[in-house]
Amino acid sequence: MSTLLEAADLGGVTLCLVWPAKLTSLTLLHAMANLERIFAKDLRGMRTLLWPGTHSSKAALNGVLADRVQLSVFFRSLWARQNGQTESTACTSSPAFLAALEALNDLHFQHPELPNPSLAELVPTFVFDPRKQLWTTTVEHPLERTLRKVDGPSNRRNLKQKVGQEWGTPERAPGALMVLHHTANKEAWQTALGAPGLRNSGRPEILLLDATHTALQTNYNAVSRIPDFLQASFQNGLSDVGAVIVTDDPKTFFVLRARLLGLKLPPVTKVWLAEAQDSLLSANPVDEAWRADQRSNSNFKVSIVDRDASQVALAFQGLTALTGGEESPAYQALIDACRYILRLSNMPAGYSDLTAASTEAGGADFSSQLNAWTPVSLALKQVLATGELNNARAQLEKGIRRAEELIDDWSDATPMASRLLAEIQKHAVVRRQSISLVLPGKNYVLLVHRFLQRKLGADWPVVEASLEWHTLSSVAETLTEDQKGKHFIFIGMSPDVLRVLLTHPDAPHGTAILVAYRQAESTLKTLEDMKGLEAFKPYRGRIGLLAQELERRLKDVPNPIAIGKLYEMSMTFKFHSDGQLSAGSEQTYYKYELENGGHAYASGWVYRFDLDEDPPFRRAPAGAIHSGDFIFDMSDELRAKIESSLRLNGDGFSSVVDPVRMLLKLYHDDVQTRCDLLFKETKRSFLARAIHAKMIEIDPWAANCSPARVYYWLALKPEGDTRPHASKDEKSFKVFCKALDISDESAKRHWGFIRNARRISQYMGRELVARYAEILFQPESAATYRKVPEEVIRQLQQDALYCVYRVEKVGPPAGHVLA
């Protein structure tokens, strides 16, 4: 925060690296700096231009509360008697912010029992939408949650009028956060920088540039263009405005530093070591003298798996110099081919597994699917047909032939899959050792599960029992001391992988890392640069060992190529299911396209996020969600945290591979806890009779339900029972739930699961995530019946704020039409 304030006063460019902590939102930096200005009696606050951002950038501020008592004391300190009149002593004036403080002061005296306001209410936020070419506000009614609690209709109207004079106007709003959307191109930059919202009184005092891993995942290209954006800003009248670039990724730090030096914009660099989860604002800050513990050395085993694919990809990339530039179809077709061949070679399964999985997810017409070679090949052949690359026709045809030869060779197993299989056979089959697999995402978990089941045959049941599944985004949460003795295998290299390998205190010795050729080369360069930073001294042992192993493996690559010339790109496929079940199924899903490029699916309820509401997460029917709404979409990382909090992930199985089993455990834990609280019987047969008696007491009709059925509901099994459930069972089950004090809504959800308990599919995975959301946003039930501590629930709800996204487009279920 002090760096932000200093840059606002002195100007210049500051490049900051915070590591190994992860920074999920930089809006908190602005809010804290803004409050610092305000408490110095600068009521105009500090106006900040944030880029790249999203419509939901402000959401994280909703999880931090401002102390209303301190704000009330501050408001009263602003007034003094001078010349027989009461006058404001503020250094700068803002009628809107004074009105906001007045409202909070009234509430402090009239309703001290009310909760404190969130920082989101005190920070006016505007987003420049490239499609509308306008600065637009993110809330319809400024300070609505606070002002609606003020006593007296006339007083409320008066305060709302004062607030509205400035709060909703981009160029006048005090302490405004101006967010430039990450999709903005150079033309949009020019328009945004020249708009009234950033001119004259609306001029920003600081440029806050987000280069965190979160921003990289949202839009890699936007982060890579930060130096260009900075240069454009300086050329458009902001040359005297200070700029602070913040990243939590060492590689991004070194790349941006080099780019800025190349543009003659030499930055002041600052590197901070931080390991706490709450690195920007913490309820329990560490002492200024804190130092990270020295990490013990760990040996790593690296395998580079895609030398042949890299050569073919480099050949495709080389031909792009002969096209008409990045906007030409030929350029895009060549880059798509380059990207495809690299992604396929680094996929830990066979091409046949990919096609089977994509066909099941996306329908029978596989040729139209995103992850097939067919559309890529057709685009290349179209380039040949246009004659644009006639001068290089022979090279392109040779590249296509070589790519198709490799794809044929990889039908059973890609190079990554073959190496993974060898590791599994060595450690799980021969040595009978437990293995933890760390994969890029949940779809890759399903792919590898399919591949290993197909390849291991009779050995699969033994191997499956020894496997533990992790994803890159959640492994830091699940890697604990009890993992010692297990063999870890990481598929691919990413900032999260590097963070875990170099800094996690429980990183196992001998961890295997299967990595792409280009990733190995760029990671080695990053590690060499990290050695020169004094702040990373506690991790130097591991940095040196990993760098040494990468260097050794790169030297072992046969017939090495100029791999440094290959563009860096994502090595993972994207999987977008259409959300529909097979023909004849009862269930259908709404599909929501989100502004981060992701997709969400829902059939019953969705949690909508609205800053004007208290609490901001409200359940809404899936069909009531429209474009422009904000919804909650659970991340893999939050999912792992919830499962850990509910103690659901201690049995070695994965909720991705087997969602039915996880749902079953969720159901069992709920029923068991309620039985312990409400009944004294411990033997299941006696307990079943006691519950049955309670059911009859609630509804005499329950006498028609046999105690055996109650006994069955107390101990559902994931398989082995194929008996149909009669319609009368549903009525009996609802009474069973009433006897256990389970709500009607939860009973309905439980019944839907019981009726389909033997049907394992990706849709049960969505049902599991929906169940987790219910637990997350119904904290009373979670605390009482699932024994989750209140402080844990609060932290999970805070994490949920980073899973809020704006809906860009809604796709209704088949046969439905949006209103």
Image (cartoon, rainbow, N blue to C red):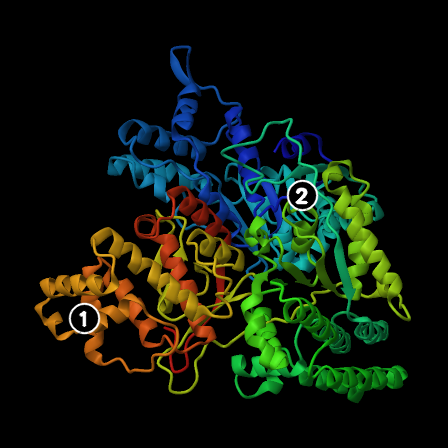
Q: Which residue is mark 2?
A: 19
Are the residues flagged by discs 2 and 1 in contact, CB closer than 8 Å?
A: no
Q: Is residue 722 above or below residue 659?
A: below
Horizontal and vertical percent for residue 677?
24, 51
Q: Which residue is mark 1?
A: 707
Q: Is residue 418 visible?
A: yes
Which residue type carries mark 2?
Answer: Trp
Q: Nearer the viewer, residue 774 or 459?
A: 459
- Residue 430 sits above or below residue 474 on the image: below
Instruction: Judge whether 243 appears above or below 711 on screen.
Output: above
Q: Quadrant of residue 561?
A: bottom right
Count of picture labels: 2
- Depth check: give the residue in front, 639 or 196: 639
Residue 532 position, x and y percent, is: 82, 41
**Does residue 597 appear anywhere in the picture?**
no
* Label 1 packing within 10 angstroms: few (<14), some (14-19), many (20+): many
Along the horizontal axis of the image, is 440 left or right of 112?
A: right
